[in-house]
């Protein structure tokens, strides 16, 4: 649990940072957040001298673990030459070439600085390309703190009971139409009446901000068919899944093609980044080629580009995916086994390198079934794991992520701590 040094820092942070943090979910660690001094491999190290096995991994981007040597080496070599030029560099061309080689739906890329910025740009681009105003999103899907999609969102918005936000005008929210994830009929009902003014459907191919909720068989291909039938664009928000579930993201995993793709997280190796990608026809609507504006001093930041290149090259040339995927499978099986033996209602959702356990009976396939989970019990398990040196997300509505640094011995240690944590809760009843 957080120690004295973290408490001192948190008290000081409360005086100078809003709520003592810079992102709301960090405040969910009780009684106060621990503060980190560094990380290596599968571990983070706190200012209180604790070593924690990390399954948050920056909420997804660190698929090679913390400070992997190939990435550190490339970044340190490059940074001695400077780190901001306001002009193009070879690194952004090289990273864009990598992305277009792995995602057949992407022929051109625009780099931005976060997943949320990528989503905002993708929505603007979809509207500019189609000349239409409205978008369809899915309840519980989180696409960043962007006005048009911060409507019935997941992630920390769900954890804190604020599915949208103050400060978003009703006229803006009215342009966002909300469907149910894994429910094609809910999408078609909207399209039947609104298609002439719908620019795009935007979806997380795997819901990763309401726990982990994979698509049911046929759901994503059904969205592709509905988009084609009604003449709207399909935006796949692969900020989390892109390069996490494989080199071609969820699109390759599930065999579906997006009109516009948003990327983030891993393509910067953990540095701040986002990207929008699509066909030449769509992308050339962006400035300076077209009338849809996007610009940013930090777009294509050279250090981020180098870190992303180094990360993807490791993923291309080693067994990193194999290790991370197997770690997630073993963790999912282990969680399922322990919770079952202690008689706790549960289901475990899994996708390659990512998973989450829900403390409820039956399948979890959308926001409504996820909300049936015993969130208070989840928090207790989180707290007991933290005492035992394991860090999972403090919110039920986040994911558990694995990396190539999570080897068998680390997984075994984790499952031992998990059983001990669950046993302590069961005995305290």
Image: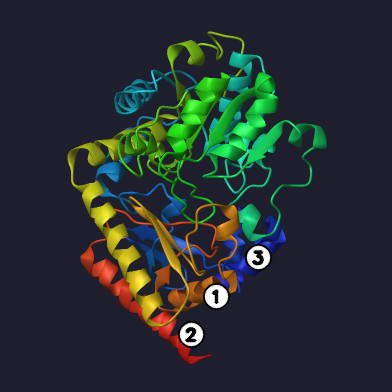
Question: How far across and how far down the image is residue 294, in percent?
Answer: 59, 20
Q: Which residue is mark 3?
A: 12
Q: Secondary structure at mark 3?
A: helix
User: Can residue 252 be seen in the rendering of this structure?
Assistant: yes
Q: Which residue is at the front of the view, 43 or 207?
A: 207
Q: Which residue is at the front of the view, 171 or 416?
A: 171
Marks 2 and 3 in Cβ contact (< 8 Å): no
Marks 3 and 1 in Cβ contact (< 8 Å): no
User: Can residue 1 be seen in the rendering of this structure?
Assistant: no
Distance from the alpha carbon under mark 3 to that under mark 1: 30 Å
Q: Which residue of the protein is positioned furthest toward the right in this rendering?
A: 170
Left or right: where does residue 151 sit relative to residue 71?
A: right
Q: What colouring method underlies this structural image?
A: rainbow
Distance from the alpha carbon under mark 1 to that under mark 2: 9 Å
Q: Which residue is mark 1?
A: 377
Between tags 2 and 3, which lies in front?
A: 2
Q: Which residue of the protein is positioned furthest toward the top in this rendering?
A: 289
Q: Which residue is at the front of the view, 157 or 405?
A: 157
Occupied quadrant, residue 333 = bottom left
Q: Badge 2, how many Cα within 10 Å: few under 14, some, many 20+?
A: some
Q: Residue at x 51, y 91 (%)?
A: 428
Question: How far across and how far down the image is residue 269, in percent?
Answer: 37, 41
Marks 1 and 2 in Cβ contact (< 8 Å): yes
Q: Which residue is mark 2?
A: 425
């Amino acid at each position: 649990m957080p120690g004295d040094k973290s408490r001192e820092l948190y008290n000081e942070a409360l005086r100078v940072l809003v709520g003592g943090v810079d992102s709301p979910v960090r405040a969910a660690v009780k009684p106060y957040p621990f503060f980190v001094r560094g990380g290596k491999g599968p571990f983070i190290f706190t200012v209180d001298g604790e070593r924690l096995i990390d399954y948050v991994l920056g909420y997804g981007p660190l698929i090679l673990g913390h400070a992997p040597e190939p990435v550190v080496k490339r970044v340190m070599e490059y940074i001695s030459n400077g780190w901001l030029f306001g002009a193009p560099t070879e690194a952004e061309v090289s990273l864009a070439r990598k992305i277009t080689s792995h995602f057949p739906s992407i022929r051109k890329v625009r780099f931005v600085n976060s997943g949320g910025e990528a989503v905002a740009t993708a929505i603007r681009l979809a509207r500019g390309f189609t000349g239409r105003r409205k978008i369809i999103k899915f309840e519980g899907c989180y696409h960043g703190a962007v006005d048009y999609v911060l409507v019935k969102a997941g992630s920390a918005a769900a954890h804190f009971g604020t599915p949208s936000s103050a400060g978003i005008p009703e006229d803006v929210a009215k342009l966002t139409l909300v469907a149910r994830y894994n429910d094609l009929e809910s999408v078609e009902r909207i399209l039947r009446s609104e298609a002439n003014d719908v620019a795009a459907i935007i979806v997380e191919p795997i819901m990763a901000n309401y726990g982990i909720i994979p698509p049911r068989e046929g759901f994503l291909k059904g969205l592709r068919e509905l988009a084609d039938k009604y003449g709207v664009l399909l935006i796949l928000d692969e900020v989390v899944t892109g390069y996490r579930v494989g080199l071609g993201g969820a699109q390759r995993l599930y065999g579906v093609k997006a009109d516009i793709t948003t990327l983030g997280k891993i393509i910067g190796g953990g540095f701040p980044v986002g990207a929008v990608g699509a066909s030449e026809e769509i992308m050339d609507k962006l400035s300076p080629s077209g009338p849809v504006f996007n610009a940013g001093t930090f777009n294509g930041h050279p250090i981020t580009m180098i870190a992303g290149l180094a990360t993807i090259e490791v993923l291309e040339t080693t067994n990193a995916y194999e290790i991370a995927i197997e770690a997630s499978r073993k963790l999912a099986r282990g969680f399922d086994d322990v919770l079952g033996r202690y008689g706790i209602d549960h289901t475990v959702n899994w996708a390659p390198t990512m998973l989450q356990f829900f403390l409820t009976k039956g399948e979890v396939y959308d926001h409504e079934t996820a909300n049936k989970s015993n969130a208070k019990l989840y928090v207790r398990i989180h707290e007991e794991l933290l005492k035992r040196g394991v860090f999972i997300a403090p919110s039920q509505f986040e994911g558990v992520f694995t990396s190539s640094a999570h080897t068998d011995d680390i997984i075994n240690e984790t499952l031992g701590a998990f059983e001990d944590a669950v046993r302590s809760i069961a005995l305290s009843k």
